[in-house]
Structure formats: C-alpha cells, structure tokens
Amino acid sequence: MSIGAEPHPRGIRQTMSDLHIWAGLLTGWFLYAMFLTGTVSYFKDELSQWMRPELPHQAEVPDAAGVAQRIADELQKVASGSSQWGITLPDARNNVASAFWRVPGTEGRRAFQSATFDPATGHKVSSRETAGGDFFYRFHFQFHYMPVLWGRWLAGFCAMFMLVAIVSGVITHKKIFVDFFTFRWGKGQRSWLDAHNALSVFGLPFHAMITYTGLVTLMALYMPWGSQTAFKTPAERQQLTAELSAFIQPGKPSGQKAALAPVEEMVRQAQARWGHDNINRVTITHGGDAAARVSVSRGDQGRTSVSPQYMLFEGNTGRLLETKDHVGPAAETRGVMYALHLGRFGDGVTRWLYFIVSLAGTAMVGTGLVMWTVKRRQKLPDPDRPYFGFRVVERLNIAAIAGLSIAMAGMLWANRLLPTDLPDRAAWEIHSFFIVWGLMAVHAVLRPAKRAWLEQLWLATAALALLPLVNVFTTHRPLWRSLAEGDWVFAGVDGMLWALAALHAMLAIRTARHSTKVRPARRAAPLRPTPSSAGERA
Amino acid sequence: MTHLAVFLLSTLGFAGLALAMERHQEDLFGHALAATATRSLRMAGVAALLLALGVIVRAQGWGVGLVSFSGHTSLGAGLVFGVLIVIERTRPRQTARR
C-alpha cells in the first residue's frame, strides 16, 4: 500500500513540527483558558477576599486552635448527625474558615454541603454570595456546565496534547541554544516565532512540570486500573485513601451519644509539633457519637508535598491515637508532584514566580495560536476571502484570547454590581462570565478580524482599568483606604487589575500600529503581510 | 534577601551567557569579542548560575530551593532577553540620528 507515499521521506523535525502545530491548534483554545484561569488561581485566596468585601481585612492570622473550636461548636448545631465534617482553617492568605459536611441519608453529588464561617465568631459569614477565586480554580481543570467528570476528562485530554506539544516543540526547535536570546523585531512570522520560542524556552521547566503534574493530580481518574487491581477489599481501599488524603473516612458510629472533647486542645498539640500557624485542616467524623475521631493536619507551608500528615485523636476523650507523618514512596512521589503543581508551599516571592512564569505559559499558547494564522495568511490565494477553516481559527482566537480577559473581568464586575439579595447570586456571577464570553464570540464573528481584535483588547483594557473605580463606588474599601490600612490584598488586587489593563492596552496599541507602520514596508516586500493586519482589508 | 540575591545572580548568569554569544556581541559591540573574553564570560555566567543554585538550596533546602531556582532562572533569562531587545531597538535610532 503506497497511497500518498512521498518520494522523499520527511525528516523527523518536519514530522514533529506538523505534530506540534496540529496538537497545539486542536486543543489550544482550551489550553489557553486552562492556562490563564490556572495562572490566576495562584492568587485565588486573595481574589476570594477581594470578592467578599464585607469581610474585614485580616491583620493577623487568628489562632487555629480557637477557630477550630468555634467552628466545631457551630457545626454541632448546623450539621449534627453528619458522619463527617471537614474544616479548613484561615491562614495568612485566607480570612475565612470553611467547612463541608456529609448530609445524612444522601448519596452522590448532593451528599455534601459546605459553608464559609467567620473565624472570630464561628457563625456563617455575612458577605455577598460568591464562588470567589475558586471558580477560576475549578474551571481550569473541570470547566463548567458539564458533569464534573466530563470536564476533568476533557482537561486531561487537552493536557495530554499539551505534553505532546511540548515534547514535539522541543524537537522541532532547531536552534534551542543558538537562538536562546534571539529576537528579530518587525519581521512578521519570524518575530512571532522568536517570541513564541522565548516564552516557551525560558519557562520550559515550569511548562513541562505544570503539564505533567497536572495530569498526575487526576491520574486516579484517568488510569484507575492499577489501584483497582491492587486494592480489592474495602479495607485495602481505605488504606489507599489514607495514604493520599488527610480527610479521614467515617467508620461505623457506636450509636451512643458522647460529647466531643475540646478540639482546641487537640489542635494545640498539633501546633506544638508543626508550628503555630501551620495547621490547615481539622476533620471530625461522627461528632457527638462515642466513636468520634478527630484529625488535625499539617499546613502546606515549607514542604514540597501534599501527602497527608496529621494527628488522629479519639473524639470523646481527646486521647492521641496516632501521628501520621510519612507515607510510602509511591504516595510521596504523587504528593510531591501534586504540591509542585499547586505551589502552596512557597512564600510570597515563590508565588509571584509561579504566577509570572505561568503567565508566560499562557502567552506561549496564545502566540502559538496566533502564529497559525500569521503563517497561513501569507499563503492565502485571496486575502480578502480566506477559506472557512482559516476564518474559524482566526475568530476563535479573538474570542478565546481577548474575549476571555473580558469575560474574567466581567465576572468581577458582576461580583460588585449584582444585587446582594439576588437568589442564586454566586451562580449568576458565573453565568455573567459565560454570557460576556458568548457575546465576545458573537462580536468576533460579526466584525472584521482586525477591528474585532482592537475593539476587544480595548474593551478588556477598560473593563480591567475601571474595576478599582467600581470598587470605590460599590464598597467601603477604596484603594486609598486599603493603602492607608496596609491591606495588601485589596491594594494588590486593585494594582494588579491596572497592571493587566496596561498589558492589554499595550497589546491593543501594537495591534493597531502593525498595519499603519508596515504598510509601506509591505509594498517594498509585497509577499510579507503582518500578523494582525488580518481584517484591515476585510 | 535571598530571593533578591538569587534573582540578581540568575540575571547576571544569563547576561554572561548571552554576551558570550557571537550574535549578541556583534549586536552590542559591533564585532565579535576575543576568544578568551568570550570564554571567561561563559565561565562567569555558568559560575553565577551555580552560585545562585547553591545560595537558594542552602537557604531553602533542595525541594523548595530547586523550585525557586527554576523560577528565578526563567525570570532572569526573560529579563536579559527583554533588555537585549530594548538595547537593539534603541541603538540604530541613535546612530541614524548622528
């Protein structure tokens, strides 16, 4: 069979290049969205604080032991009879305590309820209803409006393509060392390629790590067969869970009522072991029953592993039953990779490094997507009427790149502007995100491509730049007050919004300049149209 | 402080490596440097990067240290890249005016 056999076998580089281009293009729009929302998620706790402006700035971290006691007391009222309570304590970046609990007599997705609590009082927080930064975090690996498992499979599929794109990209890159610092300005496709290469190569360790570890975080979903074969009995499966998670699973209740011993004392013991502000979770099973168990787990600070480390107490006596501070090598490998992905172990500087390099990764995907059209625009038989596939990619790029920025800003606008008593308010914030994104997609199709890029980039600039002003008029926490009070979370988010607005303005200006500046140059070299000169003729 | 030192060392390291490349020597100085100068620049660049690694691992341990090192080197390389572009963009204009 020699259908389509070519006279000259294609080199490995050419083959890899094709693989890189098509693997990247097919999943690029998803990857861009995953990358950008994931990048933002490195500051999800800060974003959540900004989105709950009613909660005062947390000047110092409250004592974990006291908070744990207050939340446990509250849960005895709101979630009594539940077999499992999980409490996440406030920390330096997070000013609320949150808890989830298993609802007695239910199964599946509705089996859990959750709420956020005020650390000082232990009561449910009285702030606007919002998903906060958690929405972007969840979206980046499971999307929305689809069953969670589908979303995760889709994310895994895209991440696998990303891995393929990274490896094939490295092979394709002819002069990875010679061209390490090379950027050829104003050379159309060549410049785009240089920028794409720089963004990819400088952050290569991060990009490879984040893609691979991203797959590892969901590996039990993607490849369950190993553990299914190895662990057959419920007891074995429970042991596996214990190696992976500090959330202790509920056993059988005794049926005898027994008051819970002071949780505060248990947390104090853990604080003595791991440090005063290094406790992040308390899990209580069958609180109020004689068989109650309490686990207090260690925070993420300073350790590159999320493997469970916790102290387990007997609930009604407060006696220490077990201290778990290591897991097997396989579980630890996973724990380290998971921690590398989340980056929660680091200090502020490390988090900024994660954010910046991850933003470079976002730009890497973005430049890759745009380059597909740049490269092909030169070869269009009739630039005024590009073929259908070209137009699809071109328009999707606009909506996926510029449109996403507007949609994300739109969600923050909704957070400030939707009435606080709106039913399902948190859901409507999310709907706003998708409504805005959808409108941008429509806009991208209706307008000439160049105009669509410009209009959306300027709209994104305005939407981002005005948010701190909206904040002035809709909350009692304007920037000057945040600065005066040393509230770096609010001041930081406001400042970051302006920095991002400036970035979008720069992109818009460059896009606008491209055509005017290059037009005479193009006459000199007729076969070299520029990337974003797309729709100027349309 | 450690972070600042490591970031500066990474940036200097990559600056050294960039200056040890003929293309950038020609862009910046108008001609290629002598082989000995090139070699010492390259050695200095590598030494600065190794020193940065040593400093951060000493301060943070291997686990966290390697992660920070990776971040600082990415950022340092990016900064050198950006500065080279700016120098190249501003230089021809100056010579043209003269």
Image (cartoon, coloured by chain):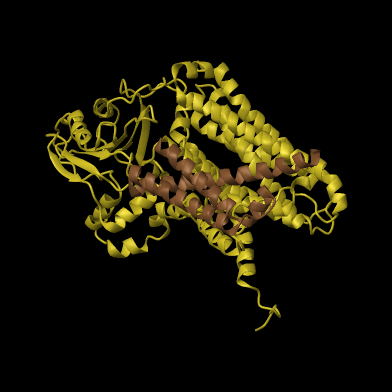
Chain colours: A yellow, B brown
**Location of residue A15 with respect to A237 vertically, above or below:** below
Q: Residue at x 67, y 82 (%)?
A: A2
Residue A105 percent coordinates (x, y)? 30, 41
Which of the two residues, A331 or A442, is positioned nearer the viewer here? A331
Which of the two residues, A51 or B80, is positioned nearer the viewer here? B80
Visible in this render: residue A399?
A: no
Q: Splitting the image into 4 quarters, where does residue A15 fall?
A: bottom right
Direction from residue A513 to residue A437 in the image, left or right: left
Residue A353 percent coordinates (x, y)? 48, 41
Q: Splitting the image into 4 quarters, where does residue A103 fall?
A: top left
Which of the two residues, A158 or A324, is positioned nearer the viewer here? A324
Q: Residue at x 34, y 49 (%)?
A: B62
Q: Residue furthest bottom?
A: A1
Direction from residue A475 to residue A330 in the image, left or right: left
Direction from residue A74 to residue A374 in the image, left or right: right
Residue A238 percent coordinates (x, y)? 25, 53
Q: Residue at x 17, y 30 (%)?
A: A265
Q: Residue at x 85, y 54 (%)?
A: A525
- Quadrant housing the N terminus of chain A: bottom right
Residue B45 percent coordinates (x, y)? 50, 51
Which of the two residues, A453 or B34, is positioned nearer the viewer here? B34
Visible in this render: residue A243?
A: yes
**Location of residue A123 with respect to A309 vertically, above or below:** above
The number of numbered discs placed on residues in the rendered structure image is 0
